[in-house]
Structures are given as structure tokens and as C-alpha cells.
Amino acid sequence: MIVNLRQTLTATKPALARHALLGLYASGAHRLAPASVRGMGAIFMLHRVREPDDTDFAPNRILEITPDYLDALLGHVRARGLVCLSLDEAVTRIAVGDTSERFVVFTLDDGYKDNLTVAAPIFARHSAPFTVYLATSLPDGTAELWWVVLERIIASANELRVRFADGEETFTSRSVADKKAAWDAIYWRLRAMGEPALRAEVRRLAGAHSVNIAAVTHELAMSWDELRTLAANPYASIEAHTASHIALAQISGEEASNDIAKGLARHEAELGRRPQHFSYPYGDPTSAGTRDFEIAKSFGFRSATTTRKGLIRSAHAQNLTHLPRLSLNGDYQDLRILDVLMSGLPFAMAKAMGSSGID
Ligand SMILES: [Zn+2]
């Protein structure tokens, strides 16, 4: 079981990790985890909050939670004695080593409209602060939400021809099962091409299948006016997530710096405040590495977060530009999983086994 847990915690498919974490919950071992592995707290990562639609083919549902789950989650963390801090306050406590209270921080990436219309009222009802990491190309209308665009292409097409680095391949996508299989086959192969090539191919496919990329952005992203409304919400803070939402590790250092700088300039021009905190797009090791942590440091951010899994520990005072987060999206929507993760046990076990996927 231990070997299995290591594999599943670092797996790319969340469903596998979910299975292992629920197994750990059933064992009850997390209740016996020593205080030394529990850490100072956690930074949670969310994206969209909305009622699920009735579509069977919805691979990006892994980036969503329901309003009811957010409501339950906020009640649950308080019941467990955890304090909800703003990101800024949490970073201060990490920096000075204040372990007086275990904390959680809620962050939502990208800048989706439902963060304002659905999530913000729920956070306010619980008097809980939250941070939106904004990629400024979303309100600018120039973002390429290629993962949503790809989903729409496969949803509408009966067949599609994808040009990978090693040649063109045809996929049938008539039934829901076909569409799911096509998504699984296409998604990671496109990711492996690197983001500039991936985007070029999704752009080409969108043209071929009449999916309007700008319309998708307009439908899902907050406008600058909506962001100003959000900025006036006393529980909300808006921080940086680049301009174009590109995987920084897959472009040159100069391009990466320019994209962060462009995002900061747009943010400051529209919202009148320079962000103090940053989150790396995608945030996994193939998307943000040591070079990018140094770039973030050069901008003077108080903190920067990845999507590497882990709790916040005292040692992170030395690593404020690559703080781990816990995804609560999609398949992780289960309060039992939250309890297991917050025990620190899965991370301590993975570390003991030399896993590099969790830090
Ligand atoms: Zn993002």
C-alpha cells in the first residue's frame, strides 16, 4: 500500500490520488499523525466555483468545485480549529515563524467570473478572506484558455485531426466515450510539445472547428469593471499570475520576465495597485523551475506559489518564492480528503520514500 500511495500521490491523474487518500482515511492513520508533520497550515488552490452542468464530457470539471462544497469546506476548516487568513497575513506569519495558530489560505487562479458572482458571497458569509491570482489577459480579452477551447472542440466534433510534433493523427469523437478517450490521448501529448507549439495547434484546431477563442475568454473571464468590484470587497485580494498565462519554464527567461512585467503593468493601470504576491501558471515542475523562482524573486514579490503539493512548514520562511499548495479542485472535493491532507501524513510518507513530487 505504501508503494502504491507514493505512486498515486505523484500521479498526474487526480482520481488515482483520491483513491489512495480515501484509503488512508479509512485506515484512520491520519488521526495518529504526530504534530511534527502537521506544519503551520496550508494554501489551498481553487479555480472555478459553479453549479455543475449536466454534460457528461467535461474534462475541465477537475478545475471546479460546487458552491455547496465551498460552503461546507469553509464550515469544516473552522470546525477543525483552523483559522482562515489572507495570503498577505499568512506570508507574514511564515516569514516571522509565527506558529500560534494553524491556518488555511484560499486562492483561486486565473480570474473567472464565477469567483465574483458565486464564490465571493460564500467567502463573505463565512467572513473568510481569499485571493484571486489574475492573469491579466483574461480581462483584457486576449487570453487563450486553450484547455477550455480544446474541450469545446472535442465536444462539438465527430472527428478531429491533430498535428503533434511527430505527425498528424485522426481521432473519432462521436460518443461521450470517444470524446473522453480523445481528450486523454490528445491532452498530454499537446502539453509535451511545449506551450508555444501547443497553443499554435489549438489555435489551428479552433479555426478548423469554428470555436471562437476570444468568445470563450469573454464568457468565462471577469472584466476589469468586475475586477474593480471584486477589489472593493473587503475579503478579496487580487494578486499576480502573469499576463498571458504561459508556462514560464517553456519560454526564454527574457520572455518570462516580460510576461510578468506586462501583467504587473496592466494590473496596476487598471486596479491602481501593484500586486505583492505571485502564482506560477500551471505551477508544476515542467512549467515553473528554479530559474523562474529567481525571476519571481527579482520582481520583489513577498511570496510566490506553485502547485507542488504540500503543507506550509517553518522552513518555508527560506522559500517564499516557491510555496506549495493543495488543490481542492474536482476529484478532491471531499472533506475526508481534506482531513487526511491536513494531517500532513501523506506528505511525510512521500518524503520518507524519497518522492520528489511533493515538497
Ligand atoms: Zn492558472
Image (tube, rainbow, N blue to C red):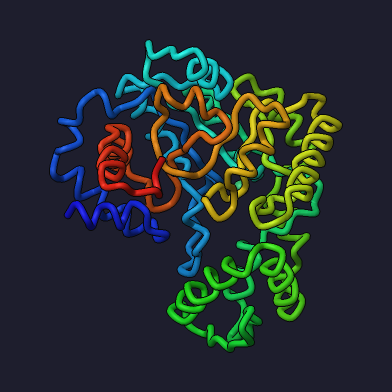
* Image quarter of residue 351: top left
Q: Is residue 127 visible?
A: no
Q: Nearer the viewer, residue 267 or 114?
A: 267
Give the position of the C terminus as an image quadrant.
top left
Residue 251 in picture, x, y percent from top left? 71, 56
Q: Residue at x 41, y 19 (%)?
A: 83
The residue shown at (58%, 85%) is: 158
In percent of width and height, residue 103 lies at 41, 22
Q: Quadrant of the N terminus?
A: bottom left
Residue depicted at x 69% and y 71%:
202
Q: Quadrant of residue 217?
A: bottom right
Residue 123 in sight: yes
The residue sitting at the right extreme is: 269
Foreground pick, 266 / 345: 345
- Which of 117 and 24 lies nearest the eye of the viewer? 24
Query: Looking at the picture, does residue 92 appear above or below residue 271?
Result: above
Q: Image quadrant of residue 262?
A: top right
Say whether residue 37 is left or right of residue 199.
left
Query: How many numbered tags mark residues here?
Result: 0
Front one among 181 and 121: 181
Give the percent coordinates (x, y) of residue 90.
51, 20
Residue 162 vertical position relative to residue 134 in the rendered view, above or below? below
Task: Locate residue 311, reporting x and y percent.
Answer: 39, 33
Q: Residue at x 69, y 30 (%)?
A: 230
